[in-house]
Image (tube, grey):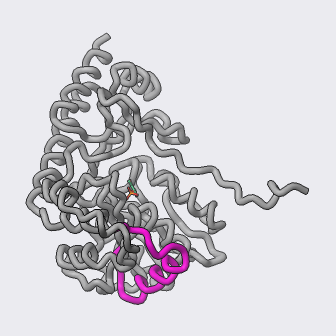
Amino acid sequence: MSWEDNVRKVIPYTPGEQPKSRKVIKLNTNENPYPPSPLVEKAIKDFDAGLLRKYPDTQATELVNELAKTYGLKSENIFTGIGSDDVLALSFLTFFNSQKPVLFPDITYSFYDVWAELYRIPYETQALDSDFRIVSADYLRDNGGVVIANPNAPTGEELPLTEIEKIVRFNKDRVVIVDEAYVDFGAESALPLIEKYDNLLVVQTFSKSRALAGIRIGCAFGQKKLIGFLKDVKFSFNSYTLNPLTIAVGAAALRDDAYFKEITAKTVATRERMKKELKRLGFSFGDSKTNFVFARHERLSATEIFQYLREKEIYVRHFKQARIDNYLRISVGTEEETDCLIRALEELVSC
Ligand SMILES: *Cc1c(COP(=O)(O)O)cnc(C)c1O
């Protein structure tokens, strides 16, 4: 017997690489290629460091009020956390306490099975179809809860809202979490459904569409009762999560709707151009509604392309996982970064 027998052993999530060199074209973690809103910069400059003497506002009131205004909700419908990873982890802990398995796709955000293992939540994965689409019928059966990333990662595919609603309606006796990390890049949000379904939790993040991955803000929307349970668990764990600077930055980002629309529209336009170029170069992929394209090449292996791009200091993501190990997830960068990517691929494909 050793103390090691009593250790909670986990296999942690592996985040995408953050290179030291600034020269690298980073298309491997779906960060926004544009800076956050100028109002964010101003909020940081104007921030009163004297505030840091005190503990933060546990309700993140300024941020929650701005979210309420932005999405036409009441503050009782809103939960905030340190990135959506924090929000999702707390949601797993709060809502998935059944002996029955929680359901999520076999190919999806690779943190879900990590949290399930960490909290010892039974789970069963449901296979995506051969086009990498979620089969909604797989979620219409007895279970301990459902998590769907929509659009899904790393496939980029959107499940139509009517299908999401079917899943939520069928599972009215357990919680359905819809992770909308990429929804702002052209997919339809399930947010309007929270009024109708008390078992639906919609999770979003400031990391992708609001260009704030570094500040760590995530949020969840649901009916008052659902959000209340989430808050009870959060306040049993760590009350002081969002600090006052983060709260000010998040609120500032929400106040600049014009900038938000501008940078998301740019990313969508670049994505569509990137799709055309990739197709021309022999890649195939689904209809991404996100800020990345999940693609395979007709002739070259993913490993080969990955290594080649890496030598050119262009980083993309390769998942060494069954079914998807011949695919690359390529984030949508700026127009210039996309030009570099395409030029590099042209060279590779032509030799
Ligand atoms: C990026 C991402 C998240 C987590 O983002 P945070 O930076 O923690 O807010 C959650 N779900 C999916 C599907 C993501 O791609």
Residue farthest right in this picture: 1
Position of the N terminus by quadrant:
bottom right
**Residue occupying image coordinates x 19% and y 38%:** 334
Task: Using residue 211 as the reference point, say whether residue 303 is left or right of it.
Answer: right
Q: Nearer the viewer, residue 275 or 131?
A: 275
Residue drawn 28% across and 13% down? 350
Q: Residue furthest left?
A: 258
Q: Nearer the viewer, residue 311 or 284?
A: 311
The image position of residue 241, as x and y in percent, is: 43, 69
Residue 243, quarter of the rendered image: bottom left
Residue 111 is a magenta residue: no
Name the one closer to the observer, 21 or 271.
21
Quadrant in which the C terminus appears:
top left
Which residue ends up furthest to the bottom in the rendered image? 225
Q: Where does residue 149 sit, x and y in percent of width and height?
A: 40, 60
Q: Is residue 201 left or right of residue 9?
A: left
- 282 versus 151 height, above or below: above
Is 240 colored magenta in this rendering? Answer: yes
Q: Quadrant of ligand 1?
A: bottom left
Q: Is residue 68 left or right of residue 129?
A: left
In the foreground, 116 or 41: 41
Residue 335 occupies which quadrant of the picture? top left
Residue 41: percent from left, percent from top: 18, 54
First to last magenta residue range: 220-243
Compared with residue 117, is residue 66 higher up or lower down, i.e. above or below? Answer: below
